Amino acid sequence: MRLRTLPNEILLLILKNLNNIHILYSIFSIDHQRLDSLSQENTFTNTFSFVLITSDDDIFLLPDYITSRFCKYILPKIDQNIQYLILDSLSMKNILQAGIYPNLAQLKIFNFNDKIFDDILQEIRFFNINSDEKFHVF
């Protein structure tokens, strides 16, 4: 059985159990309308972790080519769905500038760097958040 022949409901169940960063990187904009549409599903695109945390609490960054493709092609198309972002301070600027994120509720930053964060706060347009929304930086 081919993946493309599965009903949308089954395909979504499979996709939701896989790492959404790697799935979106693989299937987003592959010139297949059905997969492209499924990859932009709200429940599938509301949380993104751009760091990998091991069981020993070691933190690894995603490769630059993955982050770059997300910033250029994927995040601008799904930024309205994103509610949670998990980033490191080194890639934070590019990721935050890639979209507007009107529904962002939580931002977690690893390897926090005060200088980088202060510089970004001066530049990022996405901090136009309604005062009644909760916004947390960890």
Image (spheres, rainbow, N blue to C red):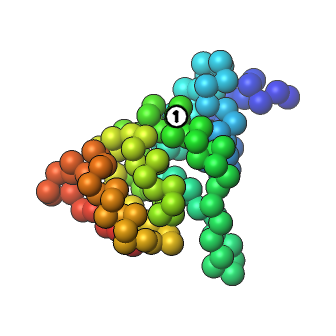
Q: Amino acid at mark 1?
A: Lys
* Relative height, residue 122 to residue 4 (above, below): below
Residue ID at (31%, 64%): 118
Residue ID at (75%, 23%): 5
* Relative height, residue 75 to residue 131 (above, below): above
Q: Can the viewer see residue 102?
A: yes
The answer to which of 91 and 133 lies nearer the viewer is 91
The answer to which of 11 and 69 lies nearer the viewer is 69
* Relative height, residue 22 to residue 89 (above, below): above
> Where's residue 107, x and y in %?
39, 61
For the N terminus, give its image quadrant.
Answer: top right
Q: Can the viewer see residue 46?
A: no
Outermost residue on the right side: it is: 1
Q: How many marks?
A: 1
Local secondary structure at mark 1? helix
> Where's residue 19, x and y in %?
65, 51
Quarter of the view holding residue 10: top right
Mark 1 Cα-neighbour bin, 10 Å: few <14, some 14–19, many ≥20: some
Outermost residue on the left side: it is: 131
> Where's residue 47, x and y in %?
48, 53
Residue ID at (65%, 39%): 25
> Where's residue 6, x and y in %?
72, 29
Quarter of the view holding residue 14: top right
The answer to which of 50 and 103 lies nearer the viewer is 50
For the C terminus, give its image quadrant.
Answer: bottom left
Residue occupied by mark 1: 72
